[in-house]
Image (cartoon, rainbow, N blue to C red):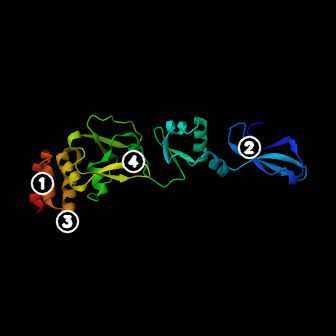
Amino acid sequence: MCGSASRRCPSISGPSSERRPTQARDPCTGIRSLRLVLNPIQHSYTWIGLGTQEEVSAIAEPELPATFTFAEAEDRGLSRRRLQRLQATGAVERIGRGLYRRTDEGLVDHDLIEVAAKAHQPTLCLVSALARHELTDVIPPVHDVAIPRGAWQPVVSAPVQWHKFALATFEVGRTTIPLDDVYAIGLYDAPRTIVDAFRLRNAVGPDIANEALRRWLRYGGKPAALMRLTKIFPAAKPALLHALQVLL
């Protein structure tokens, strides 16, 4: 009967010198999770179910990526039922809509992995970027993520505030930071982020923009670098000039 902890195999018997313990596929799951063991008293062999850890290691093949979608799992021969079993045993966890990660991999920010996996050129901006550069003490409740204007905005389970930035200036000040061995996410450098905070101060808040500028100058930032950027982003120039006059 499927699911029993052990089962007798009456057709196999004999002295221990002629038989060795072997593994076989469970007829219920198709997983190599049973072991043929000699019963020295009854001189017969019995199928013994293996523990969870051995089952997990048998399923979680090394070629399965650290982070993957169900479609990618299917391409590697992993059925939906086996994927569910991996989740049940803790070998894999769901980290987003249709996105999974092996639990034997290193710790990562699941929100950012999901964004990086689903969006086109996602880039941390505004308050999220200011926090990365230690230019604010504000802990944003959502991730501020910029994507090129016209790009498809994906549906994600992570808390994200999407911002559509002009394609012509999208790469200005853009760098990338690795999240794991496969995925990376964009990050605007400090000067670009400060300029964005001033040109979008109605969304960010003038206090956050002014404090970021104050800290950046204290860390050795040069006003000339910001003024060069205002030639590309002229909407930021009036408020930024006024703030610099007050601070300097």
Q: Categorize mark 4 by other alpha carbons within 10 Å: few (<14), some (14-19), many (20+).
A: many
* Label 3 – label 2 distance at C-alpha: 67 Å
* Label 1 – label 4 distance at C-alpha: 31 Å
Q: Amino acid at mark 2?
A: Ala
Q: Would residue 112 appear left or right of 129 to someone viewing this image?
A: right
Q: Residue visible at 63% across and 50% down?
A: 57
Q: Is residue 199 above or below residue 133?
A: above
Q: Earlier in the sequence, mark 4 or mark 3?
A: 4
Quick check: marks 1 and 4 in contact, CB under 8 Å? no
Q: Would residue 201 appear left or right of 145 to someone viewing this image?
A: left
Q: Which residue is mark 2?
A: 24
Q: Earlier in the sequence, mark 2 or mark 4?
A: 2
Q: Would residue 153 appear left or right of 208 to someone viewing this image?
A: right
Q: Amino acid at mark 3?
A: Gly
Question: Which of 208/132 is in front?
Answer: 132
Q: Residue visible at 61% across and 41% down?
A: 85
Q: Which residue is mark 4?
A: 112
Q: Earlier in the sequence, mark 3 or mark 2?
A: 2
| Secondary structure of the residue carrying numbered label 3 | loop
- The tag on residue 227 is 1
Q: Categorize mark 1 by other alpha carbons within 10 Å: few (<14), some (14-19), many (20+).
A: some
Quick check: marks 4 and 3 in contact, CB under 8 Å? no
| Secondary structure of the residue carrying numbered label 2 | strand
Residue 110: image location, x then y, percent: 44, 48
